[in-house]
């Protein structure tokens, strides 16, 4: 029998018996209630009326009119509540005797007859109460019998389900789990032996079929696996990007033809060999193995191969797997992919050369404009009115801005082409700070901003280009003044950390949103919503200057709380 059928029969029968028990209990409770109500209405009320008539009859000699009224009222109620056999005859006889008493003077004889009539009515109702009580008792006994009988059946069925059902369900699952564990341990000869005609029997047969197929598969030849391996090798070799696969023990698993071309080795010299050992003899492999983290930003690699210079961008893909039946992820190796970006690099060089050429050509006419403005301002040339003076000032500011932009473009083009020349020497950090403060003092005074220097004593000299480092600090201060409110404070802090000297510019401006903090040192980037005009190259040039001196540059900011820009340079 199917397990589902067993459950339906057992639980269904139990459910049916519970319903029958509930209906039977409700029926007998209603029957007992009805019997009780009959006693109260039919008999108890008659006894109450009889008692009131006896009391009124006893007081008829004392207060005749009041007693007659009470007696007549209860007699009328009794006439409307005649329920027992013979009660009507006694009631009507009582009525006749009462009418006689009402019309005549009371005497002992008639009062005695009325007493007898009332006692007869009471006797009839007392006997009826006893009979109805016996009926209610019998009904309750019958109800107890059936409730106990059906309750016992429900208990037996529930007890049987409690004892047998868990084992019928759990034992096959336990056996099946044990067999599955054996299969997971590659014991493919394991079989499940419960073959009943139920769901577990179907599951056991399916499991045994799977185990047979797994056993057959495990004993089969490896030609299919070899075919798939060849297919993957062909696919990798036909890719145009150099690809190298390394396992978690740094052993080279595969390398395609494009990769063999640029590293200058043969396949048999690479496959199955330790990448760390090959790195000792091959500079390119050593470069590829450096910083194997896939999260680190990589610098394009310049490689000279096949008689030409090419540029590649390294991408490292970490390969992880979840072993079957396990939740833990394990690392099984890395794949190094070199994407050829030579064409993009050539376009970038062309762009840089174009910017450098245009910027250089613009500097001459801009300088000529500045010279002409200086001549116009001299009284020897002629007098100028107020409006002309304002126009000259406006032209002077625009020419100064153009000169600054062309200077930044020239600097960035020189940095990109590697033509920037740094004069690295021993530099005094205090002198660099004072130089930068003097350069921006006028700009700070216009906004009534206080420049505060907080420096440690006896700081060592640093290895730096004094002019370029001062330019970076001036750029930091200029930005801080631009974005700070009037009558605020800007702190320039100097301190030593290990073998480095740290320059910090701290302002209380509006701060920078976290969404843009990672981009502030990118070329041409300007924070959305800022009112600053310019090329967006200042911080990018600052980054190049500091990193060219083996320094570190960065920033920290909280929106609404200000910003801290800093750079660190090695001490001497």
Image (tube, rainbow, N blue to C red):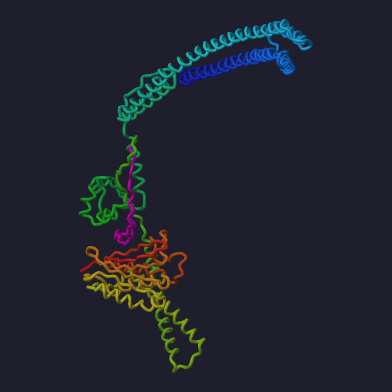
Seen in the picture, residue 29 relative to 301 is either above or below; the reply is: above
Number of marks: 0
- Magenta stretch contains residue 296: yes
Determine the main secondary structure of the stretch shown in magenta: strand
Relative to 540, residue 210 above or below: above
The image quadrant of residue 416 is: bottom left
Q: In the figure, is residue 98 to the left or right of 422?
A: right
Judging depth in this view, the residue of 248 and 391 nearest the camera is 391
Expressed as whole percent of the image width and height from the top left, the position of residue 452 reads 33, 72
Image position, residue 70 (x, y; %):
71, 17
Tell me the quarter of the picture where residue 543 sits.
bottom left
The residue most toward the bottom is 380
Depth check, front residue: 260 or 26:
26
Horizontal and vertical percent position of residue 112: 70, 6
Query: Over which residues does the magenta segment extend?
Result: 294-323
Q: Quadrant of the C terminus?
A: bottom left
On whether residue 164 falls in the magenta region, the answer is no
Residue 325 in view of the camera: yes
Q: Position of residue 419 (x, y in %)?
A: 31, 71
Nearer to us in this view, 237 or 508:
508
The quarter holding residue 362 reads bottom left
Name the residue located 45 percent from the left edge and 18 percent from the top edge: 158
């Amino acid at each position: 029998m199917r397990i589902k059928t067993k459950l339906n029969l057992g639980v269904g029968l139990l459910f049916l018996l519970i319903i029958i028990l509930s209906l039977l209990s409700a029926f007998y409770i209603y029957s007992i209630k009805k019997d009780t109500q009959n006693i109260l209405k039919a008999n108890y009320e008659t006894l109450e009326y009889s008692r009131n008539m006896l009391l009124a009859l006893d007081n008829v000699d004392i207060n005749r009119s009041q007693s007659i009224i009470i007696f007549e009222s209860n007699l009328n109620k009794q006439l409307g509540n005649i329920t027992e056999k013979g009660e009507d005859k006694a009631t009507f006889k009582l009525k006749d005797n009462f009418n006689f008493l009402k019309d005549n003077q009371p005497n002992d004889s008639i009062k005695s007859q009325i007493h007898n009539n009332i006692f007869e009515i009471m006797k009839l109702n007392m006997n009826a109460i006893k009979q109805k009580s016996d009926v209610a008792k019998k009904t309750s006994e019958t109800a107890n019998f059936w409730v106990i009988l059906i309750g016992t059946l429900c208990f037996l069925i529930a007890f049987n389900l409690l004892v047998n059902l868990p084992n019928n369900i759990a034992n096959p699952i336990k056996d099946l789990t044990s067999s599955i564990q054996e299969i997971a341990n590659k014991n493919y000869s394991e079989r499940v032996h419960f073959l009943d005609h139920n769901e577990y029997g179907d599951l056991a047969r399916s499991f045994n079929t799977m185990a047979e197929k797994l056993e057959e598969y495990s004993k089969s030849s490896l030609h299919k696996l070899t075919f798939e391996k060849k297919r993957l090798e062909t696919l990798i070799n036909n890719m145009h990007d150099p690809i190298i696969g390394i396992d978690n023990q740094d052993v080279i698993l595969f390398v395609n033809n494009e990769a063999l071309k640029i590293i200058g080795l043969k396949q048999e010299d690479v496959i199955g060999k330790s990448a760390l050992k090959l790195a000792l003899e091959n500079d390119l492999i050593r470069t590829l193995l450096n910083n194997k983290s896939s999260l680190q930003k990589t610098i394009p690699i310049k490689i000279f191969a096949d008689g030409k210079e090419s540029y590649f961008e390294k991408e490292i893909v970490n390969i992880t797997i979840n072993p079957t039946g396990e939740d833990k992820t394990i690392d099984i190796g890395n794949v190094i992919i070199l994407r050829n970006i030579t064409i993009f690099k050539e376009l970038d060089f062309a762009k840089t050369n174009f910017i450098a050429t245009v910027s250089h050509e613009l500097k001459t006419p801009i300088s000529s404009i500045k010279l002409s403005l200086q001549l116009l301002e001299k009284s020897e040339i002629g007098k100028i009115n107020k409006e002309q003076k304002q126009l000259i000032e406006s032209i002077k500011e625009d020419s100064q801005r153009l000169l600054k932009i062309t200077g930044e473009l020239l600097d960035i083009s020189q940095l990109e082409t590697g033509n920037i020349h740094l004069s690295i020497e021993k530099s005094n950090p205090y002198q660099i700070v004072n130089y930068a403060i003097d350069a921006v003092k006028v700009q700070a005074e216009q906004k009534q901003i206080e420049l505060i220097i907080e420096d440690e004593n006896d700081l060592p000299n640093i290895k730096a280009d004094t002019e370029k480092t001062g330019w970076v600090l001036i750029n930091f201060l200029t930005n801080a003044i631009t974005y700070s409110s009037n009558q605020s404070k800007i702190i320039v802090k100097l301190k030593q950390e290990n073998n480095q000297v740290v320059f910090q510019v701290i302002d209380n401006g509006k701060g920078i949103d976290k969404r843009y903090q990672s981009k502030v040192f990118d070329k041409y980037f300007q924070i959305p919503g800022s009112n600053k005009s310019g090329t967006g190259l200042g911080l990018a040039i600052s980054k190049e200057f500091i990193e060219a001196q083996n320094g570190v540059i960065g920033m920290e900011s909280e929106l609404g709380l200000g910003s801290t820009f800093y750079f660190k340079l090695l001490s001497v």
